[in-house]
Amino acid sequence: MNQHGGFDAIVIGSGFGGVLAAWPLVHSGRRVLMIERGDWVARGPQNWAPDGVRELSPHYDQTTPYTVCGDDRGKAGALHCVGGGSVFYGGVSLRFRENDFTSSPEEAAAGAVWPFDYAELEPYYAAAESLIGVAGTAGADATEPWRSTPYPQSLPGLSRIGCRIADAASRLGLTPFRLPLAINYTRQAGRNTCVGCAHCDCYPCAISAKNDLASALLPELLAHGLHLAHEHAVTRLVVKRSRVTGVQCSHTRTGQTRTFAADLVILAAGALATPHILISSELQAHNPAGRMIGHFLTRHCNAVVMGIFARALDPAREFHKQIGINDLYFGDPSGNGPAGKLGTLQQIHGPPPGLVTHLLPGLVARFGLRLLDRMTGMIAIAADQPQYRNRVEVGTARNRLGMPEALVHHTYTRRDRQARATLARTASAVLREAGAVITLKLPVRTFSHALGTVRMGNDPAAAPLAADGAFRGIDNLYITDGSALPTPAGVNPSLTIAALALRTSCLIAGLSPAQQIRHTIPARRSISLEVIHV
C-alpha cells in the first residue's frame, strides 16, 4: 500500500456535492485531489441508443449492490461516473422554497431542523446557478422564493407537447410554469447548444449540451489545477487523534490499493455511500450524534403518471421536461389531501424504449414500443417524512472491495403515500384534460433523490454535522452531499446540494459566493487528468 500526500484537500465524489465543494478550493489556490469511483462517460450517438439509459448503461454498477429492505426488497445497484448523477439527470434546477427551511412539527419532532434560513443560502443558490448555467423564467411560480439575481440564461420556446400540457393545466385553474433547466441554450466557445431531443432525462447528452458537471465544470477545474483519480473506490477513512490521516482506496479494475492524505477531507459520495463509508470506518464512535449516522433517510415518495393518447402526439420525439405545477406544493386547495406540504408536479417523457424492452416480456414490450409516440407523463414528487427507522447500515458480509455490505431499510409513512396520491390525482386530471384516454400511475422505486443520512443542525446530540458542514468529533472532515440536508422539501434536490456544498467550501476557503463566477479562477499551466497511473 502506497501513501500519497502533498494535497491540501481531498474531495471524495464528483457529483454536485463534490464538484461545487472543489470549486472555491481550487479558486483559492489549494492543491486538490478529487477521488471518483466511476469512469468518464464517453459522448456520442451511443448515448441516445436504447441501452444508453441510466439503468442499462455500463456506469450503473451492480457488483457491490445495496441490500434493500422495507417497501422495496432486493438488490439495488448504484450509478458511478465522473460527474455523478448529473450526467444522467434531466437538468431541473429548483431552489427549495423559503418555508422549506422551517421544519413542520413532525420534522422538528424527529430533530430535522435547518440551522439557518433561506436568506443564508440564497447567495450560494445564485452562485451555483451561474456556475452551472441554469436557464429559467422567474415570476410564474407562485411558490418561488425571492432571488437576488436573474437566471443566467433564458429558456427557449415551448415544444408542442409542452404547450399542450400547459394549456390543459391552465384550463383546470392551475398555474403551470417553466421548469428551470441546467441545459446550454447559449452559443459559447467549445460548447454545443441543445437540439431539443427526447433523450435527456435518464440519458447522457450525446453532444454535451446538458450542463452536467462533466461537461460544464470539471474540464475547467482540471485545466486550472484539480487532480482527478477516477476508477478509485474509497473503502475507509483512517483516523488518528481526531483527524482523518488517510483515505484508503481500491482501484475498481485492478484491485490495487492506495492511501491518500491531505490536511482537509470533504466527503461527498452521496446519501447512501457517505454513511456507508463513515460506518465502515467506525467514525460514529467519534461523533456525539453517532447513533444518528445513516438514519433519517429520505428519498421522496414519487410516482410517474403516464397518459396514453388516441393518436400520436409526438412523432418528432420532442423535449418533454418543460412544465412544472406547484399549486399543491403547500397543500391541496380543495382540502382533499393531507394537511401540510405535498410537493411538485413536473412534465416528463414516456418511458425510455430500452427499459420497456428490458423490463417487459417480448410481446408486451413490442406493443408498448408502438405506443411510445402516444405517451407523455408527469412525475409527482412528494415530500416524505424523516424517520429514524429509515437508514443505511452495514452487515457482516463483505463486498468485493472488502467493505462491509451496505443494507438499506426504507418504509414510507401513511402520510407520504397520501401526499403522493393527491399529487398523482392532479397529474392524471391534467393529462386527461390534455386528451389522454388512459392514465397509469407507477411508483418510482429508485434512490436518486436520497437525502438526510448525515444531517446538519445546531443540536450536537441530534445532528452529526455542524451548520458549516463540519463532521462533529473530527477536526478536518466535512460532508457536502445530499446526506447533509435535514429535510427533503418537495423539489429536486440537486441545486440545493450544489448551493450547500458551495457555502461549506466558501466558508473553509474564506471566499464570498460572489467570488465564485467562472472567470475568476486564475489560469495555471499544469493540467492533471489523473494523478494515479496503474
Image: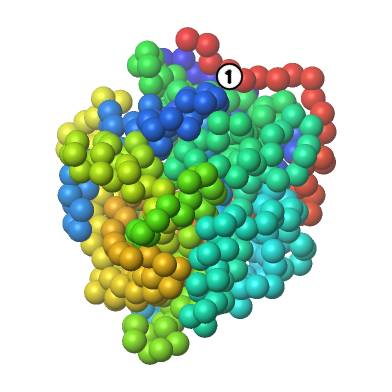
Tell me if 197 is positioned left or right of 332 in this view: right
Quadrant hosting residue 250: top left
Please identify the quadrant where the N terminus is shown. Answer: top left
**Image vertical order of residue 108 relative to residue 51, above or below:** below
Residue at 61 percent of width and 73 percent of height: 141
Residue 106 against residue 50 in the figure, above or below:
below
Residue 474 pos. (x, y %) = 48, 47
Which corner quadrant of the image does residue 157 belong to?
Answer: bottom right
Percent x, y of residue 193:
69, 39
**In the rendered structure, which amino acid carries the disc numbered 1?**
Glu
Q: Taking the image as drawn, is residue 172 in sight?
A: yes
Please provide percent x and percent y for residue 187: 77, 39
Q: Is residue 486 left or right of residue 31?
A: left
**Extreme-bottom residue of the structure:** 335
Picture residue at 28% right of the left edge, 28% below the top: 63
Q: Which residue is the extreme one toward the front? A: 311
The correct choice, above or below, for 203 with respect to 40 in the image is: below
Q: Residue at x 39, y 70 (%)?
A: 432
Residue in the foreground of this view, choosing between 276 and 333: 333
User: Which residue is located at x 44 percent, y 82 percent?
Assistant: 331
How dense is the environment of label 1, judged by Cα within 10 Å: few (below 14), some, or many (20 and up)? Answer: some
Which residue is the site of mark 1?
530
Q: Could you say whether the residue bearing mark 1 is in a helix, strand or loop?
A: loop
The answer to whether residue 470 is visible is no
